[in-house]
C-alpha cells in the first residue's frame, strides 16, 4: 500500500528574523496546503532546511506538523542522516510523534558503497514500523542509490516501499521501473515519486505515482492537478500543465533550494523569507526572474 499518490509538498520551515522556527507561520502554510488539495506533507526534508535544524528542533517541527495536520492527509517525516544511529533516533521519534511515513535521504559526505547503503537503510527500517521512502539525490549527497539496490531494499525490507528519485537521470529511473515491474496485478515493487518538478510527467509516464514537490509550496492546487490528471488518464492535460509550469520550475531552482521558494512565499505574503546560514538571500537578478515567472503563472 502506497503512503500516498499524487502531490506531496516538500514543505519549507519558516523562520523568524531571529532565526527561530516560526510555528505560527508554519501552521498557516499547512492549512494553505490542505485547503488547496495537496495529497501529503513531507516535513523536514531538504526544502525544510533539515540540515540546519538541531535534533530537538527537528523532532519538534515533526510533532507540530503531525498535530496540526491531525490526520487530514499523510505526513511523511524526513529523518535521514549520514549517521545511521542519528537516522534511527530521528525515525523513532517521528514514529512516536504519529508520522505516517518516513523519507530517508542517502548518507551524504561519507559516500557509502551500495552494500553500505543497503545496510544503512535496512538498519533504520528495522528500527521502526513506519513505511519508508528512500531519497536519491546524488547532486547533494555525492552518492547514487543504484536501481538494483533500491529494488533489493523494497523486496527484502517490508516497510521500505518506494523512492523519491531526484537524480535527474531518466534512463536510470526507467531502468528502475523496468526491473521493478511485472508484479502482482501489474503493481511495481517500488513506488516511484519524482523528486524534480520539471520531470513529474516523464516519471509518471514510466509508472511513477506522484511527486515530492518544491513547486507545490507556491502552487499546491496546480501541482496536485498535474498529478491527478495523469492518474485519471488525462496524460495530455497533465503534460500541458507540466509545460505551463516550466518557467516557474526553473526559476525556483535558479539558486540552491530552498532559497528561491522561500523568497517566492515571501513575495506571496505567506511567510518571511529568513534562511539559516550558510544559505543567504537571493541575488537581485534571480529575484527579478522569479517574480516574472510567478506573474506569468498567476501567483502575483
Image (cartoon, rainbow, N blue to C red):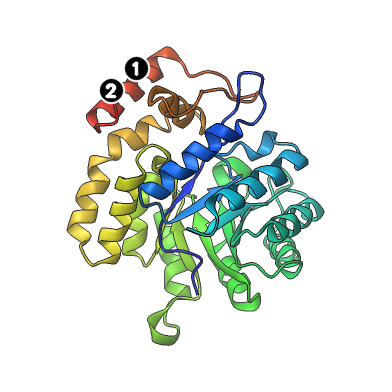
Observer able to see residue 48 = yes
Q: Residues within 10 Å of mark 1 (few under 14, many from 20)?
A: few
Q: What percent of the width, then of the height, locates residue 197? A: 38, 45
- Image quarter for residue 140? top right
**x%, y% of residue 201?**
31, 55
Distance from label 2 to label 1 (Cα)?
6 Å
Residue under the point 24% across and 44% down: 243
As drawn, 48 above or below 66: above
Q: Is residue 209 above or below residue 80?
A: below
Per the rendering, the mark at residue 118 is none
Identify the residue position indicated by label 1 in the image.
288
- Residue 202's spot in the image, x, y percent? 32, 56
Q: Is residue 288 left or right of residue 4?
A: left
Q: Residue at x 34, y 52 (%)?
A: 224
Residue at (36%, 30%) from the top-left corner? 251
Q: Which residue is mark 2?
A: 292
Give the answer, above or below, for where 276 lies relative to 39: above
Residue drawn 65% across the image and 24% down it:
278
Secondary element under disc 2, as helix, strand or loop, is helix
State if disc 1 and disc 2 touch (CB < 8 Å).
Answer: yes
* Mark 2: few/some/many CA within 10 Å (<14, 14-19, 20+): some
Q: Which quarter shows the C terminus?
A: top left
Residue lying furthest top: 284
Q: For the view shown, which residue lies furthest in the bottom direction? A: 184
Query: SS class of the residue under badge 1?
Result: helix
* Left or right: 225, with 88 as reference point: left
Tell me, yes or no, if residue 172 can be seen here. no
Amino acid at each position: 500500500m502506497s503512503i500516498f499518490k499524487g502531490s506531496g509538498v516538500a514543505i519549507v520551515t519558516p523562520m523568524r528574523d531571529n532565526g527561530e522556527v516560526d510555528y505560527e507561520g508554519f501552521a498557516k502554510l499547512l492549512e494553505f496546503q490542505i485547503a488547496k488539495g495537496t495529497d501529503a506533507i513531507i516535513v523536514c526534508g531538504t526544502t525544510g532546511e533539515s540540515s540546519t535544524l538541531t535534533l530537538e528542533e527537528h523532532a519538534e517541527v515533526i510533532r507540530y506538523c503531525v498535530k496540526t495536520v491531525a490526520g487530514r492527509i499523510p505526513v511523511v517525516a524526513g529523518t535521514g542522516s549520514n549517521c545511521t544511529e542519528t537516522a534511527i533516533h530521528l525515525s523513532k521519534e517521528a514514529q512516536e510523534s504519529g508520522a505516517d511515513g518516513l523519507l530517508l535521504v542517502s548518507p551524504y559526505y561519507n559516500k557509502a558503497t551500495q552494500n553500505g547503503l543497503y545496510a544503512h537503510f535496512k538498519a533504520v527500517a528495522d528500527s521502526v514500523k513506519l513505511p519508508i521512502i528512500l531519497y536519491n539525490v546524488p547532486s547533494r549527497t555525492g552518492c547514487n542509490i543504484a536501481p538494483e539496490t533500491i529494488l533489493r531494499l523494497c523486496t527484502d525490507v517490508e516497510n521500505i516501499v518506494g523512492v523519491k528519485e531526484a537524480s535527474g537521470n531518466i534512463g536510470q529511473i526507467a531502468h528502475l521501473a523496468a526491473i521493478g515491474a511485472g508484479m502482482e496485478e501489474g503493481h511495481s515493487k517500488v513506488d516511484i515519486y519524482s523528486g524534480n518538478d520539471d520531470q513529474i510527467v516523464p516519471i509518471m509516464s514510466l509508472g511513477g505515482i506522484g511527486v515530492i514537490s518544491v513547486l507545490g509550496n507556491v502552487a499546491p492546487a496546480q501541482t496536485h492537478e498535474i498529478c491527478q490528471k495523469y492518474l485519471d488518464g488525462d496524460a495530455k492535460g497533465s503534460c500541458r500543465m507540466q509545460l505551463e509550469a516550466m518557467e516557474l520550475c526553473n526559476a525556483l531552482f535558479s539558486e540552491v533550494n530552498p532559497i528561491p521558494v522561500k523568497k517566492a512565499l515571501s513575495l506571496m505574503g505567506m511567510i518571511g523569507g529568513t534562511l539559516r546560514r550558510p544559505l543567504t538571500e537571493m541575488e537581485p537578478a534571480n529575484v527579478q526572474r522569479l517574480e516574472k515567472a510567478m506573474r506569468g503563472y498567476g501567483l502575483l
